Amino acid sequence: MSELNNIALKILSHGKGILAADESTGTMTKRLNAVNVESTPENRLLFRETLFSSESMKTCIGGVILYDETIKQNSNSKKSIPELISSLGAVPGIKVDTGAKPMSDSPDEKITEGLDGLRERLKDYYKLGARFTKWRCIYIISKKYPSKLSINANANALAKYSSIVQENGMVPIVEPEVLMDGDHTAEDCLNKTSEVIKKCFEELIQHKVNLEGIILKPNMILPGNKSNEKISNEQIAHLTLKCLKESVPKEVPGIAFLSGGQTDLEATENLNLINKFNDTNFIMSYSYGRALQQSAIKFWSKDIKNIKGTQEVFNHRAHMCSLAAQGKWSKELEKN
């Protein structure tokens, strides 16, 4: 097995998943403002360090995606943030795209940028301790979208990014997110997500990316958030598995779902059912941001010095996600 494959398996094996803590300063400011905490570099670091030094980092979190600001900060224990994460057995990662911008030929859709200067940035991030990376593309569903133009351009960028990342000894997370926004049906989501993922792998293979050394971060198959369609969690799980079985090559070691607008409980319950019904060899785990952090940030905002209490809230949420990644979660456990 390759070193890249070892890293991917270390991040996702034994019910572990990924804590997505790569919110930009703007996004993190919105989250803190929403709970009436001032968004200063010190407060952003305090909250993140509270999570990164929690007990569940040893048992439930296999990797942490960081933002440029955070990977360069030192913790209160004087360790760098990547050193703190590594010391608890998790793998530090870094978001490397520079954001999604309107496409010149299809302004309603977006193309993710960040290839310029990527090699140089990766060398710096590797020295800082990062061993995996993230690049997110976003697609909207409507009668005419996502267009072939958007699907092809974003798949090509994801493949170029993945190739450069592997060349620098790191595992690329490939994140093609078909957004929940809209009134589309679950079947629309299934068809469009399948098309997007198939095109991504076509490009990855063409760019000679080692598929054993990547992690796929897709959306689950859900109706749009403005749709009248109501489907069961079991249907969500079956549709998601159908999509992945038909679209993802067998060499890929693991899939880490994004939560994408689901509540903590929805993201946990759906992941649990996906694992209960999983008849593939893929590890099916999580790469959650809000669905791991939301309950902790609400608790923390009441008293930002209450580190222990905040960690207990985060440990519970991480433990629930870890059980779901093994198909062992149940609603009753949420009450304990």
Image (cartoon, rainbow, N blue to C red):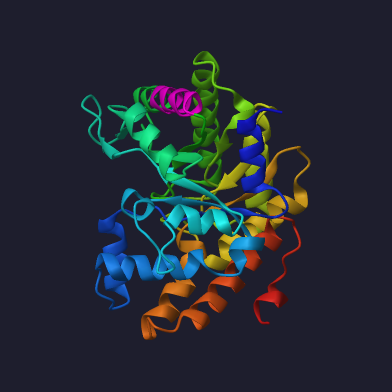
On screen, residue 90 above or below 157: below
Res 278 visible: yes
Name which residue lies at 68% across and 27% down. 251
**Left/right of residue 92 with respect to residue 17 in the rendered view:** left
In terms of image quadrants, where is residue 304?
bottom left
Quick check: is 111 in the magenta stretch? no
On screen, residue 308 above or below 223: below
In terms of image quadrants, where is residue 201?
top right
- Over which residues does the magenta segment extend? 156-168
**How many discs mark residues in the rendered view?**
0
User: Magenta stretch mostly in which secondary structure?
Assistant: helix
Res 248 visible: no
Name which residue lies at 60% across and 69% down. 55
Residue 189 horizontal/vertical position (percent): 51, 41
Residue 332 horizontal/vertical position (percent): 72, 77
**Left/right of residue 134 with respect to residue 243 in the rendered view:** left
Quick check: is 161 in the magenta stretch? yes
Q: Residue furthest front?
A: 78
Name which residue lies at 28% across and 78% down. 36
Residue 202 horizontal/vertical position (percent): 53, 19
Q: Residue furthest right?
A: 279
Task: Give the position of the C terminus as an image quadrant.
Answer: bottom right
Q: Nearer the viewer, residue 308 or 82?
A: 82
In terms of image quadrants, where is residue 294?
bottom left
Q: Nearer the viewer, residue 151 or 115?
A: 115
Task: Give the position of the N terminus as an image quadrant.
Answer: top right
Name which residue lies at 45% across and 62% down. 290
Residue 16 horizontal/vertical position (percent): 65, 54
